[in-house]
Image (cartoon, rainbow, N blue to C red):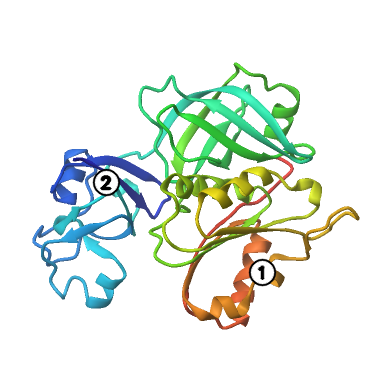
Amino acid sequence: MNHKVAFSFADGKTLFFEAGANELLLDAALRNGVNIPLDCREGVCGTCQGRCESGQYTLDYVDEEALSAQDLAQRKILACQTRLQSDATFLFDFDSSLCNAAGTQTVQGVVTNIELVSRSTAILHLDASANAQQLDFLPGQYARLKVPETSQWRSYSFANRPNSRNQLQFLIRLLPDGVMSNFLREQCQPGMTIELEAPLGSFYLRHVDKPLVLVAGGTGLSAFLGMLDELAVEGGRGHPVHLFYGVTQDADLCEIQRLDSYQARIPGFEYQAIVSQPSEQWQGKVGFIPEHFDVERLQRRSFDIYMCGPPPMVEAIKGWLDKQQLQKFTMYHEKFIDSNSR
C-alpha cells in the first residue's frame, strides 16, 4: 500500500508525493523529483536530516553521531533510513529551492458562492475541480488569490481540508476599502474565475501527541477550521482540543454552528468565543484571550499551542506565556496583517 508524503520546507513551501510500501523515504523522494540534499546514504552523515511532524515510521540504522537519543525522541529522522508505516509529514530546515522543485501549483477556481457569515466576514467558495489532480495542502496552510482584473494577490488560509473534488473555502475579512473586499462586495458573482497559487506556509497541524490549545484572532479562525475538519474526519487523535476564538465585537463572530458541530464529532473538543468590545446583548465571555486561559490546567501537563491572528494578539499571548513561566509546551504561530489595501 502506498503512503502519501508531504515535505515542508523553511521557505513555507510543501511538496507532495507517494512512497511505496517499505520503500525508503529518500528513494521515494528522488523517484518523484524531490532532490533533497544527501551524501552518504548510510545513516551516518546526517545530511538528509528532517523531523517527522505527523505519521508513523521506522528507522533502519542511525549512527549516534548523526542523531542523538534526544533527537530521536523529538522525531528527527534521516530520509535515507526511514520507512513509512502511514501517511506522513516531514519538515526540513532548508528552502525548497535546494530540491530543484517549485512546490506550488497555480490553478483556476470557479466561484460557487460568496457567503456572508458575519457583519465583517465572508466565506468564498471555489470549485477547482477542473484541475486534473487534487490540490494538496496541509490543514492550516494558505493560498495566494489573484484579485480578478487587477495585478494584486492576497493571501488567505484554507477554511477546509483538502478533498478529491477540489472544493475550497476561504474565510475573508471584509475591510472598508480593500482590493479583495471591494471585489467581493461589488463584482464577484458565481461563475467567475479566480486564479490561486498553493500550497504555502509552514503553519499546519503537526503530529498530535498531547493536548492542543488553538488560539484564533478574527479570520485567523480560517486555518483552524481546516485543522478541525481534519480532526473531525479522523474522529480526533485521542487528546483534548481547546479553541479560544477572539473578536473585537460580537457582530464579528462567525461559523459558530460549525464550531458547535465539532463538539459532537471530535472527542474532547471545546471552544470559547471571547469578545473584547461586546454589545449589551452579548452574554458570553468578554475581554482578551489570555484572561481566559486556565493556568493550573496548562501547568499540569505539556501541550502544543497554535496561534493564528494579528501580530498584537500573538505577541500578547507569547508575553503571557513568558510571564506565567510555562515551559512544557511547543508553540506554532501564523501572524497576518490587515491593511486598507488588502
Residue identified by numbered label 2 = 99
| Residue 100 point in image, percent of width and height | 27, 42
Q: Foreground: 129 or 33?
A: 129
Q: Foreground: 294 or 7?
A: 294
Residue at disc 1, secondary structure: helix
Name above or below for residue 209 compared with residue 180: below
Taking the view exactly as shown, the residue that stands out farthest to the front is 264
| Residue 270 point in image, percent of width and height | 60, 59
Q: Residue at x 45, y 63 (%)?
A: 239
Residue identified by numbered label 1 = 316
Taking the view exactly as shown, the residue that stands out farthest to the top is 191
Residue at disc 2, secondary structure: helix
Alpha-carbon span between mark 1 and mark 2: 37 Å
Q: Residue at x 10, y 57 (%)?
A: 41
Name the amino acid, label 1: Ala
Q: Nearer the viewer, mark 1 or mark 2?
A: 1
Q: Residues within 10 Å of mark 1 (few under 14, many from 20)?
A: some
